[in-house]
Image (cartoon, rainbow, N blue to C red):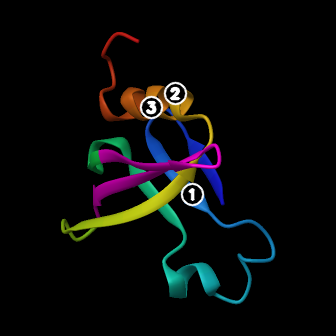
Amino acid sequence: MGITITDTEFGCAPHFPFNLGGLPEKLRLEHRIRGADIVSVEHKSYRWGVERVLIHARNLMGTQEAFEISIRDVRAFDQAMERIRNPGAPS
C-alpha cells in the first residue's frame, strides 16, 4: 500500500499488481481525503515494527467512514497528518 500526504490531502492506494482489475474499487482499498475531512486518527496495535492506524473521515456525501492502515514511520506520519488537518498551525 502506498501512502501519500500532500499539503492538503491524504491518499493511499495499493501497488501493482493489486491495483488491477478494479480490485481497489471493489474492496475500497483506495482513498483520497482532504485534510479538513479527516475526523480522527487513532493509533491501534504495534507489532513487528508496524503500527496500525484507524482513520475516521467524512466522505463526499458527508457521512463518516473508517479504514485502517499500517504505518512504519509513525512520527513522520503524525507530523504530516497534523499539518494537513490544521493548516496554518505552527509546526
Residue 86 versus residue 88 in the image, above or below: below
Q: Residue at x 26, y 46 (%)?
A: 40
Dot 3 and dot 2 residues touching (CB under 8 Å):
yes
Q: Residue furthest front?
A: 47
For the residues carrying marks 1 and 3, which lies nearer the camera in this image? Answer: 3
Give how far apart the Cα atoms at labels 1 and 3 are.
Answer: 15 Å
Q: Residue at x 74, y 65 (%)?
A: 15
As for residue 73 lying within the magenta part, the answer is no
Q: Which residues are magenta?
A: 41-59
The disc label shown at residue 78, or none:
3
Give how far apart the Cα atoms at labels 3 and 2 are.
Answer: 5 Å
Dot 2 and dot 1 residues touching (CB under 8 Å):
no
The disc label shown at residue 12, or none:
1
Instruction: Classify residue 39 as left or right of residue 55.
Output: left
What amino acid type should be assigned to the residue bearing mark 3? Asp
Magenta span: predominant SS is strand
Precedes in sequence: disc 1 or disc 3:
1
Front-most of residues 70 and 81: 70
